[in-house]
Amino acid sequence: MITFDDVTAVYPGQPQPALHRVNAEIEKGEFVFLIGSSGSGKSTFMRLIRHEQRPTSGKVYVAGKVLSNLRQWKVPEFRRQIGTVFQDFRLLPGKTVFENVAFAMQVLGKRTSEIKEAVPEVLELVGLTGLEGRRPDEMSGGEQQRVAIARAIINRPKILLADEPTGNLDPATSVGIMRLLDRINRRGATVVMATHDANVVDQMRRRVIELVQGELVRDQQRGVYGAE
Amino acid sequence: MRHILRETWSGLKRNRAMAFAVMVTMWVSLSLFGVSVLVAEQVDVMKGRWYDKIEISVFLCTKVHGGATDLSANTCEPGQETTPAQRELIQTRLEANPDVQEVLYESKGERFADFQEAYKNSPIKDTFTAEDMQDSFRIKLKDPEQYEGVMNEAVTLPGVQAVQDLHQVLDPLFAALNALVWGARGLAALLIFAAAVQIANTIKLSAFTRRKELGIMRLVGASNSYITLPFVLESLAAAVGAIICSGLTVAALVKFVVIDRAKPFIDTLAWIGWDAAWVAILWIAVTGVALGVIPPLLSTRRYLNV
């Protein structure tokens, strides 16, 4: 589903590459933790998958496509296959829960009848039934993250990228979010989650890819946060 | 589509003052642009009318003038009138010129009668006699702009005392009028440029306040046209308002200033009418639409690329 083939990414003006000769292959339906300290290259890794930047050298393949060959006008269509969740939720403050989730369908030009059917379904999946009319500032962090996840998966992406989704949440709430991501993964989506959260990684025991200063230093099935 | 329209509407509502300011700027710029079109049309109409009246006058030699130096031509024998043979030769040569439409002969007597008619209330009329007048040819040209060839030929013919042409009088006037036209155009272009910059800037601000939404749109894969369209429609709405206002401004100008005032007041000049107003309004509409579409496309571009 996602392949990094000898990928190096250098930001202009910085001597140290953000990623250096990274090779990795993520299969369809996998759940992968991407770990490493701040500045280790996790975010660059995610940005490359979303085609928000191009590698300086090497190739990134996502869903069977070489991203460097992707035409600019094809990018929006490509991004529809990827859902993204952030640490800071990125909800629209003026809109209700329902509207925030529906927004992702509206901007793709989906019909109102379709939206009215799909949104309650996905809200049920993330456990927010009954909160449709709330606004983000009336909700807890965990609830807001659930809204963001609902929005990320409403268009049924093949890949879900989660960038520190539990970074702003307390441990108990984090567990709930992880259960949700696990459920989404079981429904068939490939999940890549960048995280600092050792507890979460240790509990889940999934594949772990560790980056240190842009180098891939560990790629381990059923791994934990600290090297064993 | 309904969602796009709703976005446009809420954008307009949110930036009501801004949209109004943009509209007024566009109104003023487009109106001035329309006026510059009208001025150009007016100069064209006047040129057409005056050039239509332009004739080249070829004056023949008289006993009095013979031998006197003259600016444009002097092929006279001193003290001799143009002979009938010379006169005939001049007429045939002029008629044979491809630029000439018509050659009319006007004798001293006819000219004197004209003169007396023109100055019938003035004491001057009694100080001249028919002998003071000159025989002349009046030449009408096919194309009034093509006068130099005929003049150059006429001055070489024997028996021609002088060649006179109204271009010498009118050309500086038209040069001044052309300068006026280009000045108005330049000013209009400057204002339109300023309006374009203001629109681009306003849209940029409006996109900046909505950058969070735009980011999410891009994240979930909204197409570029979907993201841009509300901004384009927003400025297009302002443009349509401005087009209507400046169209009315130009129409009012033509009706109340030109048709109702200037035309009856200075009847001898040719004046523009409604057809010129329509030309100006058409130009305003085309420019206005371009002004509504191009700047937002340029200023939202950076929100679309990655």
Image (tube, rainbow, N blue to C red):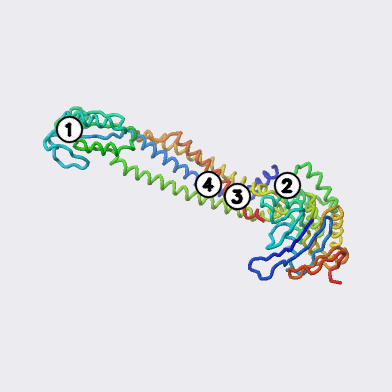
The vertical placement of A40 against B210, above or below, is below
| Residue B235 locus on image (x, y percent) | 59, 47
**Are the two marked residues, 1 and 4, in contact with CB atoms closer than 8 angstroms?**
no
- The residue type indicated by label 1 comes to Met
Instruction: Give the number of marks.
Output: 4
Q: Nearer the viewer, residue B265 or A209?
A: A209
**Residue at the image position 73 percent from the left and 59 percent from the top:** A60
Outermost residue on the left side: it is B79
Q: Nearer the viewer, residue B72 or B10?
A: B72
Q: CA distance from mark 4 to mark 2?
A: 33 Å
Chain for numbered disc 4: B
Both labels 3 and 4 in a single chain:
yes
Kindly identify which numbered label has been placed on residue A108.
2
Earlier in the chain: of badge 3 and badge 4, it is: 4
**Residue at the image position 22 percent from the left and 41 percent from the top:** B72
Local SS, label 1:
loop
Chain for numbered disc 1: B
Q: CA distance from mark 3 to mark 4?
A: 17 Å
Q: CA distance from mark 2 to mark 3?
A: 20 Å
Residue underneath mark 4: B26
Kindly identify which numbered label has been placed on residue B133.
1
**Are the two marked residues, 4 and 2, in contact with CB atoms closer than 8 angstroms?**
no
Residue underneath mark 3: B297
**Residue at the image position 65 percent from the left and 55 percent from the top:** B305
